[in-house]
Amino acid sequence: MKYMLLIYADENSYNDGEREECFVESIELTHDLSARGQYLAANPLQSVTTATSVRVQNGKRLVTDGPFAETREQLGGYFLVDATDLNDAISIAARIPGARKGTVEVRPVVELTGLPKTGELVGAVAK
Amino acid sequence: MVNRPGHRPQLQFLSRLAKRWTMSTSASAIDVRSAVGEFYRTESRRVFATLVRLLGDFDLAEEAVHDAFAAALKQWPTEGVPENPRAWLVSAGRFKAIDGMRRRARFDASLGELAERIEARTSASGGADLDLVEDDRLRLIFTCCHPALAPEHQVALTLREVCGLTTEAIASAFLVTPATLAQRIVRAKAKIRDAGIPYQVPSREELPDRIETVLQVVYLVFNEGYSASSGDALTRPDLSREAIRLGRLLLELLPESEVIGLLALMLLHESRRAARTSATGEIVLLDDQDRSLWNREQIAEGESLVERAMASADVGPYVIQAAIAAVHASAENAKATDWAQIVSLYDLLTRVVPSPVVELNRAVAVAMRDGPTAGLSAIDAILDRGELVDYHLAHAARADLCRRLGRTADARNAYKQALSLARQEPERRFLEGRLAELA
């Protein structure tokens, strides 16, 4: 099963050194997952101060500054992984450095048929 | 992976029973029918646990259990009770489920594929292996008590699926409507399916955390029966009995020290049930209880379990709490209680699980050991930190110590505060009674 691991934390709780360390550790984790065939994608997000919210109402585009919801902890990054079951996904989530600062939300992914294959897309871009 | 006791008296009994019936041709159909009923009572949850593994779905398994017992009711009276009734029931349930899916596959092709997969993955004798079957019961417990499920869903699902209580019985025990309770069970099953909660006994590394959740569920059920959180009655004995039964099952499957500790704790609390309320349903405090009403059998069993658990390398919170209950149980009256030992056990408990509630209990024991003044300052220290200010028992304990010190006005204020926070009727009547005495 595919799981989205959403990392929520107070982004101001990291100093530069900690953020750097968090990236290094996260990259290590992606390689470890990749070696087991479980890695699909992962990215940290820019600060929530860069967030823009978009809504379309009655065909009219409504663009506002800021995230969807103002909360103490913000979405700061994600891992998309292939795990055998929820227990496996939870074990991976527990290894994400952000879990020590904030919360990792584990969400099973709805697998739609008919989506373009990520691998092919990457191949096409590389050509 | 998990230690299991080698002795399984119930199974031996069952196979003896089965042999007797198969060999004796004179067994009447009525006997066999009542035997099916008996098997249903003792075996249906085991058969269910195995069918969940084989079929990979709670609802399919539930339906298969009913079909299997219906088939037994039809076939056993004429064909005799099979040599291994449990394996027969599992295999009948599996067959009926696959058969049913194939029939419905005319309308939904995916069911046909599912039936093929289940048939290929499992064998007809998949339920016969004894270790696997015992593991199935553990799998069921750990799945129902998965920490990814909401606590009230864990409780509802465990009582429904592991204990086999009806939705109506669980709903009335927790003072919710059957519809609400049914909704909880539906949601929990949906999460198990959609979030991919596996039907597994956790790995060695995960086991301690996961056992903790299971024990919490069992203790929650016990406490709801022993000291209902709201409502007219102080206790609901059925829930406590069910929790003790669950505790015994867990101990049989997983003899870890905290599992022993929890069973001991429940037995030692339960032993006081008859003495905890007066004939008119009023609360009788531990100090004032008629100890001749305490259940000696449960105390003896609890004490020997505590000894067994204390011998293990690391003692956890349930073992320590059981040890405290055992010290109370061994005293002839409140005064003769070894309060020094109780305080030191609370010290240990505070180190293992620091919590203001544990500190409050320790403060009460300190008051018994060193006098009310010492206890009162310990309670005030907790309240001054802003902790337990909304906990009625903190104010009730404070009130009692003020009363004993002759500080009547302070005692009255504290009782009033406790009363404003208490929600259970017998507790409220008790507090009102104390308040009236101080008028």
Image: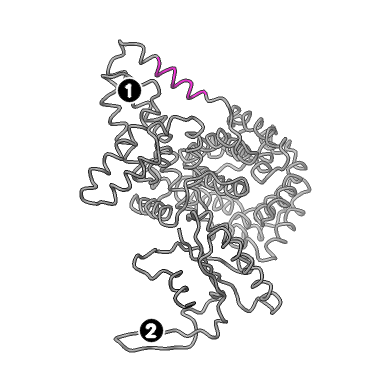
Left or right: where does residue B337 sit relative to residue B62?
Answer: right
Q: Residue at x 71, y 52 (%)?
A: B350
Q: Residue at x 67, y 56 (%)?
A: B355
How many numbered marks, from 0 up?
Answer: 2
- State if disc 1 and disc 2 touch (CB < 8 Å): no
Q: Residue at x 35, y 15 (%)?
A: B22
Disc 1: host chain: B
- The image quadrant of residue B115 is top left
Q: Nearer the viewer, mark 2 or mark 1?
A: 2
Residue range (magenta): B9-19
Residue B178, percent from left and from top: 34, 49
| Nearer to us in this view, B364 or B105 | B105
Q: Quick check: A25 above or below B143?
A: below
- The image quadrant of residue B122 is top left
Which residue does the numbered mark 2 point to in the structure image?
A55
Q: Main SS type for the magenta part?
A: helix
Report the residue that reaches farthest toward the front: A127
Q: Secondary structure at mark 2?
A: strand
The amino acid beneath tag 1 is Ser
Left or right: where does residue B90 sit relative to residue B315?
Answer: left
Q: Residue at x 76, y 45 (%)?
A: B344
Disc 2: host chain: A
Q: Secondary structure at mark 1?
A: helix
Identify the disc placed on residue B34.
1
Left or right: where does residue B87 sit relative to residue A49?
Answer: left
Q: Name the quadrant of the N terminus of chain B.
A: top right
Q: Name the quadrant of the C terminus of chain B.
A: bottom right
Magenta region includes residue B158 = no
Q: Quick check: B14 above or below B113?
A: above
Q: Is residue B289 visible to the viewer in this orientation of the structure?
A: no
| Nearer to us in this view, B169 or B337 | B169
Color theme of the render:
one colour
